[in-house]
Image: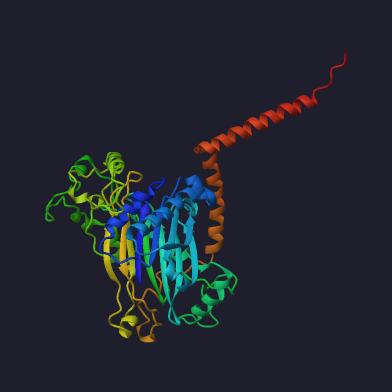
Amino acid sequence: MQNLIVTYNCGRDLVEPELFALYLANTLQGCPNPDFLVFSLQEISPIAYAFLGGSFLVPYLDRIRCAVDSLAKARGEATYISLITRNVGMTVLMAFVRQDLLGNVRWMETGGVGVGVQEMGNKGAVGLRLGYAVGDETMEMTFVAAHLAPMEWALERRNEDWKNIVQRLVLTPVDKKAIQVVATARRSQVRNSEDEPLLPGSTDNASTPTSGIYSPISHLFFAGDLNYRTSSSRPTPADFSQFPQPGLDKANSSHYLQLLKSDQLAVELKAQNTAHGLTEAAIDFPPTYKYSDAAREVAATKEQTRPTSTPMDNSLSDTTEQDETWLWAKHRWPSWCDRILYLDVPSWMKSHDPSASIHIHKYTALPLMSTSDHRPVMLSMSVPLRPIPPPNDEVADGDWRLNPPYPIDPQWRQRRRIARSKEIVVGLSAYLALTWEGRGLLIAMLVGGLGGWAVIVSMLQPAVRL
């Protein structure tokens, strides 16, 4: 199974689909065509549109769909169908599958959680689990798109966001038809007896199966703007002079790989304070954040002068390391905020089949686009095309799939419902105050109200008799 996962902080702006597709196509050279494409998108649009959702998000999401179509044409070997699109506030998960494989997708579960202000979706996570037919069996894959707390000093808050995702991102079937299929699959998992609820303390309808992001028989992929930095404090002017630049020897203290030694995510993973059990392919690309306005202006110039006659152009491959200067923002440490992690195959699967492993084809960043101060990151990988078997009792202990780091919050649904109500209020307020169409609507309502009041007052005036 060939998977392509892309994470991108869109900067609340419309993505240019042809450019995005071109950068993806060039970066994917040498990689197999993906069977599944999964996009983790953060800050997909201004907060008003993201919180209101629905048709307000269509222009932003259509750009990604167009990029997938253009990528398929550039690669020339596959057509992709949109499998599902789900957002929680400003964080979106979009999944696509090769058209000829669509019939193998047996069921899907989705869920979402806000971890921003008042548990709203200015930061948050969206999850998708799907069952894929492999002969008479079903292979499960779980994808999570996330956006965690910003700022260098907010390390503990990011770890807390991860905890909240594990506790309150609960996956439920997307339609009634899938409920029985998923329920049957869940009953086959160890650790869940026939008469024990899947979520202890849950008051939800028992006929609707639910589960967290960890599952004994599912692969897990976690991608997003995780916001882990390379320092716990803001840079000083003296620090800025030492920011990494291209062309340096790897042994140089200012080479970008030296920053990995202070990468917060690597430290917290090792300490098992976040993303428990997950791993990451080796990083050999420069930091993906934060590029300055000047860097985005340079990117805009390149975009305006790019050739359009060829579907793939090596001249537009990532030349970041060959640039004369990297234009960093002065008030943020260059950091690998945008990451893609995965849970390796479990030990009991390897004991059944020693050759079972996840193979990484490429893990890298795409070129900077003018619409964002982040660079997109992509992971091309092969996943064993076979189900993860149920574990043996002897190896059950100590595996995060069977022993998640945090229990499911029994109030997850109620808390999400309350947060969603707040999002609608905030979204509507932002729409009326911060968007041109909202202000126009507000003015029209005000003028209409004043006109109506004037009519009513005139009707209430006593008649003048001559």
Q: Residue at x 33, y 57 (%)?
A: 74
Q: Nearer the viewer, residue 362 or 23?
A: 23
The furthest residue to the front:
309
Q: Position of residue 411 (x, y in %)?
A: 54, 64
Location of the N terminus (image quadrant): bottom left
Q: Where is residue 451 in the image (x, y as percent from the top left)?
A: 68, 28
The furthest residue to the right:
466
**Image height check: is 393 above or below 427?**
below
**Image height check: is 443 above or below 314?**
above
How many numbered marks appear? Answer: 0
Q: Position of residue 440 (x, y in %)?
A: 56, 34
Figure quadrant of residue 273: bottom left
Location of the C terminus (image quadrant): top right
Q: Which residue is drawn at 53% across and 41% down?
A: 431
Q: Residue at x 19, y 53 (%)?
A: 256
Residue 228 in view here: no
The furthest residue to the top:
466
> Is residue 212 toward the left or the right of residue 457 in the image?
left
Q: Which residue is drawn at 33% across and 85% down?
A: 352
Q: Nearer the viewer, residue 101 or 261?
A: 101
Residue 239 in view here: yes
**Image height check: is 211 above or below 149?**
below
What colour scheme governs how the chains and residues are painted in the rendered image of this protein? rainbow
Q: Nearer the viewer, residue 459 or 235?
A: 459
Q: Nearer the viewer, residue 455 or 116?
A: 455
> Is residue 152 toward the left or the right of residue 442 in the image?
left
Q: Position of residue 133 (x, y in %)?
A: 44, 77
> Is residue 345 toward the left or the right of residue 240 in the image?
right
> Is residue 180 toward the left or the right of residue 27 in the image?
right
